[in-house]
Amino acid sequence: MNIKIKFTLKSLALGLLIAGSSANAQTDTFSSNVLSVDDIAAAANSFSVSNLATAAEFSSITDLKVLAANTVSFDYNLPNDGEPGKVLIWYEAMDVDLTRKPDFSMNLPNHKGNDFVLTDRGINFQQGIYTIAITAGQADNTVAATKTMIVGQPAHTGRSTLFVSAKTKGRITAVYNSPANVVADQNITWFRLFEGEKLVGGNLMIQQTRPPSRSSGLVSMEFAPGTLIDGQTYTLVLNPGPTTQAVSASYTFQYTLQ
């Protein structure tokens, strides 16, 4: 079975065909293959699935520009609910390196920003390698999106994305993606499903108690038939780090069985 998904990014419309064969995945198991979403399509903040009322919030860093040797600007997006985040920078790191303290840290003013300017006299973005990250909460290990720079040139991008790929009377299967090296904290429930559209503090319906071991992949959540009501709206959230207040991606959908 194929599911056709239409992404919308400002005036840009992209079509993506995704195979829905994941319905046979076992609960509490994770795909050994890394699944990713196209770099451009993943930047979308909302999209619609045919015949379903669907919305998503992704985390991303886009349109990064070097304004001077020690100054950059970029747009960023984080889900609106949850803790305020931070911007972190690691020097001489191609990806997030949670084994050491970031070389730069500051609070973000809000959950979304356009042409956000970052300046630090101790940094020369035109030399060396830097990984810029934004977090979904105050803890450093809630990294939600990244952008790597090599001698002043933007290189690869990491984003947090989430969508439900299959639904049955007793199971929901979802595909998730986080930046490289961002894996689940052992003390947190990474996937939580709420009734309605709330991302934090809503009526909790289902939670995945076993954390995944990879930054990206597939997760299946089983539940007793009748737990979810056909036609009702639910929101699945991705919670990195040590707190459920830090939401890096969400997916709101109608639980419609066909």
Image: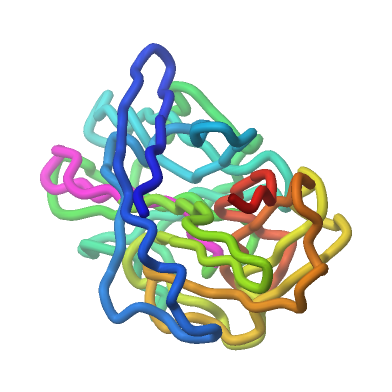
Q: Nearer the viewer, residue 184 or 41?
A: 41
The residue at 39%/12% (across/down) is: 11
Residue 62, by quadrant, is: top left
Any part of residue 217 in sight: yes
The residue at 52%/37% (across/down) is: 77
Let me know if residue 153 is in the magenta part: yes
Q: Nearer the viewer, residue 66 or 220?
A: 220
* Residue that lies at the very extreme toward the top in this rendered image: 11
Measured from the top left, where is residue 26 in percent x and y?
A: 48, 84
Any part of residue 119 in sight: no
Measured from the top left, where is residue 247 in percent x and y?
A: 64, 55
In this image, 133 relative to 79: left or right?
left
In this image, 104 relative to 247: left or right?
left
Question: Colour scheme in the image?
Answer: rainbow
In this image, 162 relative to 6: left or right?
right
Q: What stretch of residues is rendered in magenta?
A: 142-157
